[in-house]
Image (spheres, rainbow, N blue to C red):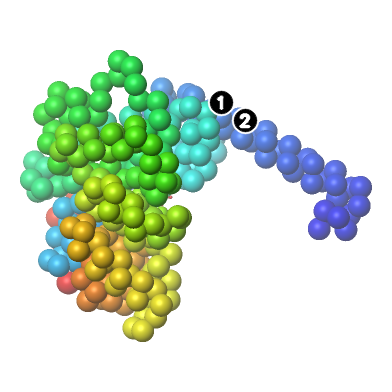
Amino acid sequence: EAKSHGRNGFCFFTSALQERAHKRLRMASDLHVALEQQQFYLVYQPVVNLRDGSIHKAEALIRWQHPQRGLIPPCEFIPLAESMGLINEIGDWVFHTAAQQVRLWRSELHPDMQIAVNKSPLQFQSKTGPTPSWAEHLKADNIAPEAIVVEITEGLLLDASESVQRQLLSLRQEGMRVSLDDFGTGYSSLAYLHRFDIDFLKIDQSFMRDLAPGSKNLTLCKAIIQMAHELGIQVVAEGIETRLQKDLLQEAGCDFGQGYFFAKPLLPEDFLVFARSGQTPAP
Ligand code: C2E
Ligand code: MG
Ligand code: MG
Ligand code: MG
């Protein structure tokens, strides 16, 4: 397209790039004020127990309500926050907000409620110094550490530095749970599952595509579930959008399901209604 327009096309291309760079720059400076001005909020997606239909889990997902640009999805600003060194601050805010939420739900909904928070690999890099750990915060606020599930990605395990290993170990020793997100997408190595103790594994939503009896993806899901169970790991299937997908995973022995078939990420008040109504399709 740009080539066919010769010089003009090139100019157009350049200005489009400039426009993008400019937008990024603006977003970067806006990110700085977003925290102070409380432009972030969390939505919570139900995670349904596929054995009994209970809803004792949720994943916290961040949203940015920009005063001019409207709602900005995390895939647009999380990588930016990571490159700007802001991810620790944002990540801590997510953690604190989610922790308060789960404390409330443990008294309002069910004593076993758990909330999963996503933790960027970069948040494992520079956590030294006087900042109190998440565990210390939980203690101070009298929140059971078992209520928190920390979602990490395979990229973190690829690093596999001693420091990362130590941090993951201490998260679990402190009583929090660890979940391996987006399993099957990156450098998936079964060795990770063995080397790092984790509590949950989330099968990536890409495996849900064309899920049908006899399909390759179903075979893969079954293998992952069996292997995980043999290692004492519980499995969450992400991105379940249809009844068929839910039925097949349930039959395959998958422990939990998450996806639009059950519910989209919800505001706290909507989550409460959803969890109370028990309106998930019967297992
Ligand atoms: P993730 O942790 O794998 O979260 C699941 C994503 O899949 C969410 O997108 C969710 O809204 C979406 N999803 C859930 N069910 C379905 C479904 O049935 N179909 C489809 N197509 N999508 C579904 P979201 O909220 O846009 O978040 C995208 C990614 O951004 C997350 O992927 C996570 O990697 C990152 N993220 C979100 N919140 C945070 C956060 O607080 N901290 C960090 N570090 N990353 C976050
Ligand atoms: Mg996640
Ligand atoms: Mg995921
Ligand atoms: Mg994902």
- Report the Cα–Cα distance between label 2 and label 1: 6 Å
> Residue at coordinates 44% horizontally, 58% vertically from top-left?
185
User: Mark 2–mark 1 contact, CB under 8 Å?
Assistant: yes
Question: Image quarter for residue 176?
Answer: top left
Q: Position of residue 84 (x, y in %)?
A: 52, 28
Q: Determine which of the numbered discs, if any, sits on residue 25 in the image.
A: 2
Mark 1, Cα crowd under 10 Å, few <14 / some 14-19 / many 20+, is: few
Disc 1 secondary structure class: helix
Please determine whether, in this image, residue 157 is positioned above or below residue 200. Answer: above
> Residue at coordinates 34% horizontally, 32% vertically from top-left?
163
Q: Position of residue 209 (x, y in %)?
A: 43, 71
Please determine whether, in this image, residue 14 is positioned above or below residue 34. Answer: below
Please determine whether, in this image, residue 53 is positioned above or below residue 268. Answer: below
Q: Which quadrant does the N terminus fall into?
A: bottom right
- The answer to whether residue 283 is seen in the rendering is yes
As rendered, which of 28 and 128 lies closer to the eye? 128
Question: Image quarter for residue 173?
Answer: top left
Disc 2 secondary structure class: helix
Q: Position of residue 45 (x, y in %)?
A: 29, 52
> Residue at coordinates 24% horizontally, 74% vertically from top-left?
252
Q: Residue furthest bottom?
A: 214
Amino acid residing under circle 2: Leu
Please determine whether, in this image, residue 90 is positioned above or below residue 55. Answer: above
Q: How many callouts does the rendering have?
A: 2
Q: Position of residue 206 (x, y in %)?
A: 43, 64
Splitting the image into four quadrants, where does ligand 4 fall? bottom left
| Residue at mark 1: C-beta within 8 A of ligand 1 | no
Amino acid residing under circle 1: Ser
Question: Image quarter for residue 255?
Answer: bottom left
Name the residue carrying label 1: 29
- The answer to whether residue 266 is seen in the rendering is no
